[in-house]
Amino acid sequence: MSKHDHGFATRSIHAGQEFDPTTGAIIPPIYQTSTFVQDGVGGLRGGYEYSRSANPTRTALETQLAALEGAKHGFSFASGLAAEDALIRTALRPGDHIVIGNDVYGGTYRLINRVHGAWGIEHTVVDLGDLAAVEAAIIPGRTKLLWVETPSNPLMKISDIAALAALAHRHEVLSVVDNTFASPALQQPLSLGADIVVHSTTKYLGGHSDVLGGAIIMNDDELAEQLGFVQFAAGAVSAPLDAWLTTRGIKTLAVRMRQHSANAQAIAEFLDGHAAVERVYYPGLESHPGHELAARQMSGFGGMLSLALVGGPAAATRLVEKTKLFALAESLGGVESLIGLPAQMTHASVKGTELAVPENVVRLSVGIEDVADLIADLDRALAKVLKASAKH
Ligand SMILES: *Cc1c(COP(=O)(O)O)cnc(C)c1O
């Protein structure tokens, strides 16, 4: 039975999840072990030797991750940035070059700029909506990766994965898509021509704000072998319990993403035109510049949205401190709603760079609570914002 023949929700639940042959336990156990007993030197049972090289709980998650993106190879890491680090050190050498979008996750930029930069890897930041600029940024023979993130964080810009992947291929550059915001339930970059998918599984895949993790997913056998070597040799692997929690979260990904999207759409429509709100950034709104492209390359608009406040940074700060259900916290993608001020929080590391975010922008990670309660929470907090601005 090939898991790839099934639909997305079925694959999310069954890929890598064979029941335990010794007890019949429907859920594969958490193999909380560092090492494996050998039947004589080199006599491995099922190929397992030491948990840095492989652990059955991680194997189960990696099989599931590959199936989610319809791919051959999945690799799981201790965090999204650990996954990105392993990929970059696999695909590049000192003197090589990366082209990255001007609104990638701040931590990705920091990793490439400050960690890999110190080891001689160079980068150029471009607007991924400008294909001519992307092409011009590619240095023949030196550019190895084109790093795409769509929808972007926090301004929800939509980039054309198929067009960018085709452009990268023409120049023998690998295209990478950070698919964290959409999740594979809503967007399948490999089927649009991308070479590699990256996830912070900390977000929608885990889905319950209780575990960190990252993933790299691809079809290329040779690159997969090289990445597998770096994963083993450098060792930033996910621990068994973390892998198990992520697997558990993934099983409900399809239904969660439907509800995240429905709630975010209703909230975007509520905020659009509100007296305290200057602008709403949500691809599900027809007024969003990426709406048509998003409708084409995604099967839902997701649970992330941002808004700019009429009252500037002070109003933005007030809003994030006044909501009750929306908790003030970094991160995203959990069942509970979060609110944040990117310029001071998630994007503090890119302050003063070309990736800086306007200071009156508030980001929402819309959870799957009752949407009427979420709207009432925002309505009350926005009324306080308006009242405070009227006093000044
Ligand atoms: C959170 C995040 C990352 C980094 O993942 P960690 O699990 O925090 O290391 C990368 N990309 C995006 C889009 C993210 O939201």
Image (tube, grey):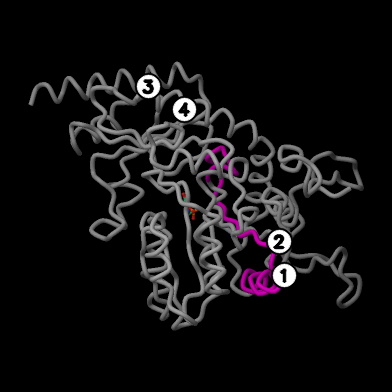
Distance in Å between CA atoms under marks 2 and 1:
8 Å
Sequence-wise, the earlier of marks 4 and 1 is: 1
Check disc 3: other Cα within 10 Å, few if <14, some if 14-19, many if 20+.
some
Does 206 appear in magenta? yes
Disc 3, SS = helix
Does 93 appear above or below 256?
below
Residue 13 occupies quadrant: top right
The residue most toward the left is 392
Type of the residue with mark 1: Asp
| Local secondary structure at mark 4 | helix
Residue drawn at the location 15% of the way across and 23% of the way down: 388
Q: For the residues marked 4 and 3, what is the alpha-carbon distance in whole angstroms? A: 9 Å
- Residue 341 covered by magenta stretch: no
Residue 262 point in image, percent of width and height: 52, 26
Verify CB contact (< 8 Å) between mark 3 and mark 2.
Answer: no
Q: How many marks?
A: 4
As shown in the figure, which amino acid type bears the numbered disc 2?
Answer: His
Q: Which residue is mark 2?
A: 73
The residue tagged 4 is 265
Q: Are marks 2 and 1 in contact (CB under 8 Å)?
A: yes
Is tag 2's residue or tag 4's residue first in the polypeptide sequence?
2
* Magenta extent: 203-232
The residue where tag 3 is placed is 270
